[in-house]
Amino acid sequence: MLDGPVVIGSDLYTSLRERTLEFEKKNGRRPRVLLTNMDRGSDGKRVKSFGVVYAEAGFDVDICPAFKTPEIVAKMAVENDVHAVGVVNGGSENRLPETLTAILAGYGALDIQVMAVEAGPSIGSNIAAEPGEALAVRYAEDTLDRLGA
């Protein structure tokens, strides 16, 4: 866990930014993530907060309109040629990543990584205990790990 707030320009951000630059050199483009909120009980602020952190870390970020079906999210992911989909849902719909993965497989998009991006303690790991921005940075790191960067 991090001590104190994460500041843009900090060593952690600099390290994350370096990793995204390496990804870009290796793949010819920046890592691209689609963030979506499919939980009707959420106001969507988490998606925007995570999006800011991902963008500051060097990702291209797409934000799906709120409350779209998994089918629409999967179609948007394929059409936007993203590397990863982050389902920001606060833990209320923990099967959504599995559903999205299955739909993406139907599109032949098995290379798109799908992950639950939780903003509360419900996922049961140290990552969830961190405050907002630090948590988002950890998810950005995890995304790069999943992409092999």
Image (cartoon, rainbow, N blue to C red):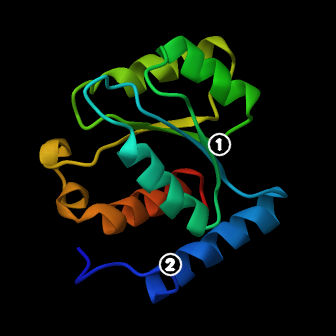
- Residue 98 in the figure: left or right of residue 18: left
Residue 50, which numbered label?
A: none
Vertical arrangement, residue 83 with respect to residue 24, above or below: above
The N terminus - image quarter: bottom left
Q: Position of residue 36 (x, y in %)?
A: 48, 34
- Residue 136 in the figure: left or right of residue 34: left
Q: Of helix, strand and loop, which one carries label 1?
A: loop
Q: Which residue is mark 1?
A: 83
Q: Position of residue 89 (x, y in %)?
A: 32, 34
- Residue 10 in the figure: left or right of residue 32: left
Residue sitting at the far right: 28
Q: Residue at x 42, y 17 (%)?
A: 99
Residue 13, which numbered label?
A: 2
Q: Of helix, strand and loop, which one carries label 2?
A: helix
Vertical arrangement, residue 91 with respect to residue 74, above or below: below
Give amino acid for label 2. Tyr
User: Observer-nearest residue: 115 or 137?
Assistant: 137
Give amino acid for label 1. His
Q: Position of residue 119 (x, y in %)?
A: 27, 49
| The quadrant where residue 134 appears | bottom left
